[in-house]
């Protein structure tokens, strides 16, 4: 899942308010609502926000693995560990 929590923190650090974004940079309320709800936005928009806030994309966006992704990764890791253990046992 992509989360935009860092966007709000970066805005505060830069001293830019939502009002500033509406009035001076023509950022729409619907875009800010999409950011609040962690919905899809275009790369062009992320680029524009980075330019406005003078920051890197990582200051706006964070990837948080879904629980399904975490479960799949754990299963794969466990399978690799079991396979590796069996190979080590057989080589003895």
Image: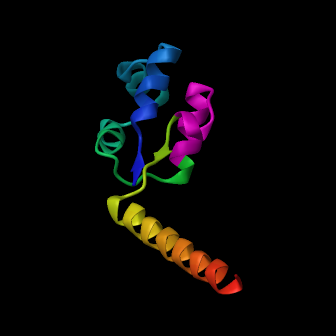
Residue 52 on image: x %, y %: 57, 28
Q: Quadrant of residue 12?
A: top left
Residue 84 vertical placement versus 59 (above, below): below
> 77 or 52, which lies in front?
77
- Which residue is at 40% across, 18% downward? 17
Q: Quadrant of residue 36?
A: top left
- Which residue is at 65% across, 86% downward? 90
Q: Residue furthest right?
A: 91
Q: From which residue to which does the magenta span run?
A: 45-59
Q: Is residue 24 visible?
A: no
- Which residue is at 58% across, 75% downward? 85
State the count of labels: 0
Q: Residue furthest top?
A: 15
Q: Is residue 39 visible?
A: yes
Magenta highlight on residue 14: no
> 90 or 25, which lies in front?
90
Q: Main secondary structure of the magenta part?
A: helix
Residue 34 vertical placement versus 92 (above, below): above
Residue 30 on image: x %, y %: 30, 42
Magenta highlight on residue 50: yes
Image quarter in which the C terminus is found: bottom right
Residue 72 vertical placement versus 26 (above, below): below
- Which residue is at 61% across, 76% downward? 84
Residue 61 on image: x %, y %: 49, 42
Residue 67 vertical placement versus 84 (above, below): above
> 56 or 23, which lies in front?
56
> 74 or 64, which lies in front?
74
Image quarter in which the N terminus is found: bottom left
Q: Residue furthest bottom?
A: 90
């Amino acid at each position: 899942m992509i989360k935009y929590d860092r966007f709000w923190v970066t805005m505060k650090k830069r001293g830019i308010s939502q009002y500033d974004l509406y009035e001076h940079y023509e950022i729409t309320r619907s875009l800010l609502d999409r950011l609040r709800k962690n919905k899809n936005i275009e790369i062009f928009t992320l680029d524009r926000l980075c330019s406005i806030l003078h920051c890197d994309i990582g200051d706006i966006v964070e990837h948080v693995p879904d629980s399904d992704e975490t479960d799949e990764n754990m299963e794969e890791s466990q399978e690799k560990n079991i396979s590796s253990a069996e190979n080590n046992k057989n080589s003895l």
